Image (cartoon, coloured by chain):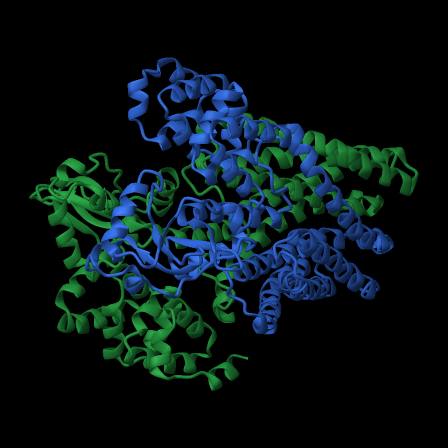
Chain colours: A green, B blue
Amino acid sequence: MAERKAGTMSLDPEELAKRHPAELAELLHELPDAEAVRLLRELYKVRAAADSLEEMDPNEAAELLEELPDEEATAIISRMEPDDAVDVLEEFPRDQVEEILEHLRSLDREKAQVLQRLLAYPPDTAGGLMSPEYVALPADITAQEAIERLRKVAEEAETVYYVYVVDREGRLLGVLSLRDLVFARPDTPIREIMRPEVVTLSPDMSAEEVVQAFDKYGYLAFPVVDEEKRILGIVTVDDILDVLTDEATEDMYKMANVPRQERVDTPWYESLRMRLPWLYINLATAFLAASVVGAFEGVIAKISALAIFMPVVAGQGGNAGMQTVTIVTRGVALGEVPPGKGARILAKEVLLGLLNGLAVGVVVGAVAYGWKHNPYLGLVAFLAMVGNMVIAGLVGASIPLGLRALGLDPALASSVILTTFTDTLGFFLLLGLGYVFRSVL
Amino acid sequence: MAERKAGTMSLDPEELAKRHPAELAELLHELPDAEAVRLLRELYKVRAAADSLEEMDPNEAAELLEELPDEEATAIISRMEPDDAVDVLEEFPRDQVEEILEHLRSLDREKAQVLQRLLAYPPDTAGGLMSPEYVALPADITAQEAIERLRKVAEEAETVYYVYVVDREGRLLGVLSLRDLVFARPDTPIREIMRPEVVTLSPDMSAEEVVQAFDKYGYLAFPVVDEEKRILGIVTVDDILDVLTDEATEDMYKMANVPRQERVDTPWYESLRMRLPWLYINLATAFLAASVVGAFEGVIAKISALAIFMPVVAGQGGNAGMQTVTIVTRGVALGEVPPGKGARILAKEVLLGLLNGLAVGVVVGAVAYGWKHNPYLGLVAFLAMVGNMVIAGLVGASIPLGLRALGLDPALASSVILTTFTDTLGFFLLLGLGYVFRSVL
């Protein structure tokens, strides 16, 4: 399909330049690699390459750029918005970044310095997310003068979210929206129309905290300031959309023990390298559960009916526990669980485990009884089921709450930890009760 | 904790009016219900109630408003942004909505009509997300006149994202940013500075499609238009932040079979009612796996060692399969899997299943051999492990791809479907091979 599209696609420069960068980015994403590189070089000629790459996944954009001659790649990077350029550079091998920066220094010394400064911040912090393209104006000019100055910088600062008002040392005094400026009397000093209370971010704030600030205040951008309140850059709402998507992916991945870098089109050998360690960890916990079964091998040899209820008791515990883990983990991630509330949530989940356990256990017990016409087998299956569901509620709620209390990520490997408990203890309950009742089963 | 804070909290109206609505919303969220209602009534007196409720979860805001006298609740709702007011009204019981709208009609007839119209759209569509607070101007006025007109409406449209240019029939002709307007020569007709290519939404577009539009184009707002291109409202980027968070929650919930309405503080009886049906579905699938074990009861009675490897083979298959399900589901959700690419992804996951299966199977086989000093037990465990890992890859990738091909949600109940296969077929492989080799085990 992609091949055909490429064949019939017009590479007419004028046609291309008319299309929205987001659509060109989609095209680059869908084309086979060689075709995509060819298209990118055409876009480069009509100066549409940088805009298109800004709209792509930084990882993919880096892969395409690596295929270009160094000078073309450098020229494109120099034309990208600095925060997007940095995201792409972070995907390059370390030494290649140095090379590109070296090239860039001869091309645009100032830009190279800006990128180098931004690269110093870890990507998942406010510093790593920020863009240096903001507008700051001195406090003592008038609204009219401010608009004049804005007109001059308009070319560079593509979207003017807010205008920041600073003192002579560059320290943040207040903020103005473009609207405040337009609707003020022209001769008013901007000091009088600015809003002096500005919510600021510090460069080392985590991406999650930044997202919470956007969520809480609903602004379109926040300034990032140093300790002396000098503006380092701004984080804008469109950067946050990507962070939110990435965070959701990350939480899901962590719960299922999927390596965070993996995507659906990661090459198989990379996937293998990343997934296998997790599977070995799982294997260790599976042997733990198996060793419980092994300890009761004599009981199973005599009462093989117990083996049949092993997957039911363990599986139901695992499923109920995952419901609990998911709800509590998500609640913690969304900030719905203040520290004092943990005990109440734990109590609720244990109660639910008991009640769900009774409801499910009655069915399991009845099936066991009806099948072998042995009331004791029914009793053993019922008790093991109820017990394992209580364990599922207790462990399922404790994992995210406990991980958070330890300062760790609440979603970390939670499914492995949970099923280790629900398998091991579930088998222990079922087979242990079988051992107790062995004379009547 | 919350009690103490409430005790020492100043309810001084001036103090309250100075705080940011987002902070007041947080306070309302943290206080016990009675205290929160008391605070809300104080906020109402200083006209800060509507702004604060806009920042809250609509569900919680509705709960607080239900505790107020009808006229106070109505007054507060009338002062909220229409899209936020509608979100809150959707949380009220149907008949109470009618009552509030009735009240509102006598208070502010126009507002009541706006809310009624918005309530007609399902909440998870572009129509349900949109706000009627946009600015539209005729095409033949000048930039200077446009700014004059904007100055007049500035009070109502709190954030002017874009200015829409319409013809005499209200049909959309183009779009202007405030920046375009400010930086244009004052006597230019806005028809000449507007951008005629506007990306629009239709009111019945799903929230997911709306998110994709924001993600793709990076705009701050999109107009929602009817078939004749008349503007119905706009969806702004801050509405999308909430949708993104909700969607991520929904996907995680679906994979773990958690009911979508449940939150960490849902009352226990509601949680019970919502979770139990899922557990009964799980139970049915667990019995399916158990019936496979039951069919081989004779083999287990003779070779009880097989029971020990049941949890290992089934558990590893389930874990590896969840890795696959998670990655493919997320890939589909993020639009990284174009329709033609399904077969390649399936092939990759089956290959990974085989390779991971070999790597894990060697360890499982070695343990089985070392434990009973029986090479055939080792072989059976090894083969069952490899086979179940291949099944895990095949089924894990097929579920999200298959659900999508059927027009269903790729995340729907995927963990139940997966473990049904990995348990049932895992047991069948292990016990079936045990049966084949029964004379030498």
- Residue A431 position within the rendered picture, expressed as x and y whole percent measured from the top left: 75, 40
Query: Is the residue A202 above or below the residue B215 in the image?
Result: above
- Residue A249 position within the rendered picture, expressed as x and y whole percent measured from the top left: 48, 53
- Residue A276 position within the rendered picture, expressed as x and y whole percent measured from the top left: 53, 61
Residue at screen point 23% across, 72% down: A100
Pick the front one: A130 or B147: B147
Residue at screen point 25% across, 43% down: A202
Whether residue B1 appears in this view of the structure is no
Pick the front one: B383 or B236: B236
Q: Is residue B283 left or right of residue B402?
A: right
Image quarter in which the C terminus of chain B is found: bottom right
Report how many numbered discs are placed on residues in the image.
0
Hey, which quadrant is residue A66 in on the image?
A: bottom left
Hey, which quadrant is residue A242 in on the image?
A: bottom left
Q: Is residue A41 left or right of residue B387?
A: left
Whether residue B422 appears in this view of the structure is yes
Query: Is the residue B378 above or below the residue B232 in the image?
Result: below
Image quarter in which the N terminus of chain B is found: top left
Residue at screen point 34% across, 76% down: A17
Q: Is residue A99 left or right of residue B217?
A: left
- Residue B176 position within the rendered picture, expressed as x and y whole percent measured from the top left: 32, 57
Q: Is residue B311 left or right of residue A416?
A: right
